[in-house]
Amino acid sequence: MRKEHHRHSILKDIIGMLDLTKLYPVERVVLEAAGGKRSSEGTVDHIITSGEYMVPVRMYPRKNARWLMIYIHGGGWATESIDTYDGVCRSISEELRCHVISVEYSLSPEKKFPYALNECMAVISEVRKNIRIFGLSEEDIVLCGDSAGGNLAAAACTLLRDRENIHISKQILLYPVTGSDYSEASPYESVHTKGTGYSLTSRHMRDYVTLYMNSADDLKSPYFTLLNGTDFSGMPDTLIFTAENDPLCSEGRAYAHKLAKAGNFVKHYCVRGASHGFFKEYSSAAASRARNIMRDFLKGRCG
């Protein structure tokens, strides 16, 4: 298992040295191949239909589950899948003893902002309508995402509050994308101090943002660039993980600060010595520790 993850990391680093705005299809193939075949044992693949959207999901049911987690995977909005995140979602379902619904949103640049966000909103809407099927209530729904998936999860919570006055109970964000400036002019320290030499680079992020946006105007939207928001009140209880060796570290910390300043319950953990993507190495000590903290957060013991 560790060899598989190590190979995945090396291949991603090699691809990341190239121009991802042109070679994102190659990265997709590499990541899918490195992920290996996935077993469907104990899972249910389904298509959620809501309005114009038909979104594939993979469900990980658990007996006597206390929560239902909607998990939105990372990959710069342009790569990864429910297959490459199968191990991540299995480990969450087993260790946190919760139902997990993993979302296969459409990737950029084929579908640009806000298409993937709208698909995530469609999934959340249908899950809320049918939550009684799982023997749970709307208060038992948790949104979780890592990296670009963390961006989509937090943006969805903001949209639900703004457009429908709906408040999700809890969200868990792992090294989320909350800014959009990864140039030399970026206001966030880690873009400069951790922007090279690690699993994710500032150049990666510039390429991913370019693939996701339709135009520079998108960057002004608080549903794209979360830190551009003017109202951070009324958000879910929030658990945020950042990684020390990650260009996104400073902006994740800034987002946690804004949520807390607006009166929300927020817990922020910076994982020392970790790089972006550590949670996907689901058998690692860092990922295991993060799942333990997530369990305590869900149980209300994350003080």
Image (spheres, grey):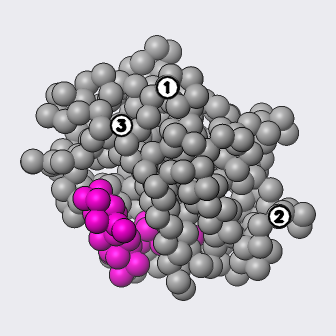
Q: Tags 3 and 2 in contact by the CB under 8 Å rule?
A: no
Checking the image for residue 127, the label placed there is none
Amino acid type assigned to the residue bearing label 2 in the image: Pro
The quarter of the picture where the N terminus appears is bottom left
Image quadrant where residue 129 sits = top left
The residue identified by callout 3 is: 57
Badge number at residue 187: 2
On the image, numbered disc 1 is attached to which residue? 165
Q: Could you say where residue 72 lies in the image, as x and y percent from the top left?
A: 45, 46
Outermost residue on the left side: it is 63
Determine the image quadrant of residue 2.
bottom left
Residue lying at 40% horizontally and 78% vertically, measured from the top left? 286
Q: CA distance from mark 3 to mark 2?
A: 37 Å
Q: Amino acid at mark 3?
A: Val
State the extent of the magenta-drawn residues as a range: 276-303
What is the distance, in whole Å, between disc 1 and disc 3 at their CAs? 25 Å
**Mark 3 / mark 2, whichever is N-terminal:** 3
